[in-house]
Amino acid sequence: MKIFHELLGPLDLPDRFGRIVSLAPNLTDALFALGVGDRLVGRSAFCHRPAEVLSLPVLASYTKTRTDLLRSLKPDLVLLSTGVQREQALRLKEEGFPAYAVPLPTSPYGILENLSTLGHLLDLEERAAELAHGLAERYGRLKGRFDLKVYFEMDLGGPITVGRGSYIAQALLHLGLKPIFLDLPQAYFPPDLEEVKRRRPDLFLYEPKPWGKNPLAKARALAEERGWDFPVAATDGDELAHYGPMFFAFLEKLADRVAETLGQA
């Protein structure tokens, strides 16, 4: 298969991929959603869904790869995302690996576009189109469910929020949860916590690291520590920050939690 990749340039890949390595959790999610998770032979340290991937060898973080172990697995395809994995993808291609990088989405529709891209690459176009159509319908049903200003924060080793140009901000806006920093032309950035207080959001929406215990209690403790008195809701961790097909189910769960918090359930 000879194709041209916008970042990696001309690629000469196998016609069929029997042995796939995924170095990004969104792509691991997509492979299972497309029904080819059984072709995975390696993963990144951050690929922890579904549970069956945990038995696979860990080959990389987001920026570093165990190339000797990767080479020993003889993959037909190594999947990465762009964004922070851009240099890693270029490096793996230079070292002779069959690398392919899927773009970082700027809206939830980019997640669906990535499904179509994988469908084309893996000769699963009909399955990918059907899946994307179903997810788009589910996303459409969430439109305008609320009318609130929200401050969203995720824990990435420190607080990070979203502004213009991020798929998370676009998804929240779709639900009617307007991010308070939507006027800033930065997709992801550390927030000014005093500015959060000045902007008076109607809701503090918190996403902890995965595997944390009692995320709502953690969010409430943060709000109290910062002197905030607005309502609090929390995800279970690594949900909105996850941009595979599973994102849409996480978004539905979030909408239900916000409704419960506001007494609208």
Image (tube, rainbow, N blue to C red):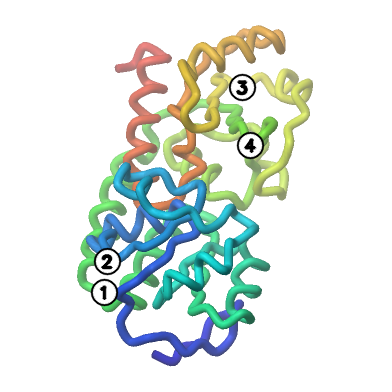
Q: Residues within 10 Å of mark 4 (few under 14, many from 20)?
A: some
Q: Quick one: label 3 or label 1, which is nearer the N terminus?
A: 1
Quadrant in which the N terminus appears: bottom left
Q: In this rendering, is residue 257 above or below 16?
A: above
Q: Which amino acid does label 1 sit on?
A: Glu
Nearer-the-camera pick, 229 or 11: 11
User: Would you say residue 83 is visible in this rendering?
Assistant: no
| Label 1: element kind | helix
Nearer-the-camera pick, 15 or 136: 15
| Label 3: element kind | loop
CA–CA distance in space, label 3 to label 4:
22 Å
Q: What residue type is labelled 2?
A: Ala
CA–CA distance in space, label 4 to label 2:
31 Å
Q: In which quarter of the image is residue 14?
A: bottom left
**Which of labels 3 and 4 is toward the front?**
4
Q: Quick one: label 3 or label 4, which is nearer the N terminus?
A: 4
Nearer-the-camera pick, 209 or 234: 209
Residue denoted by label 4:
156
| Label 2: element kind | helix
Residue denoted by label 2:
128
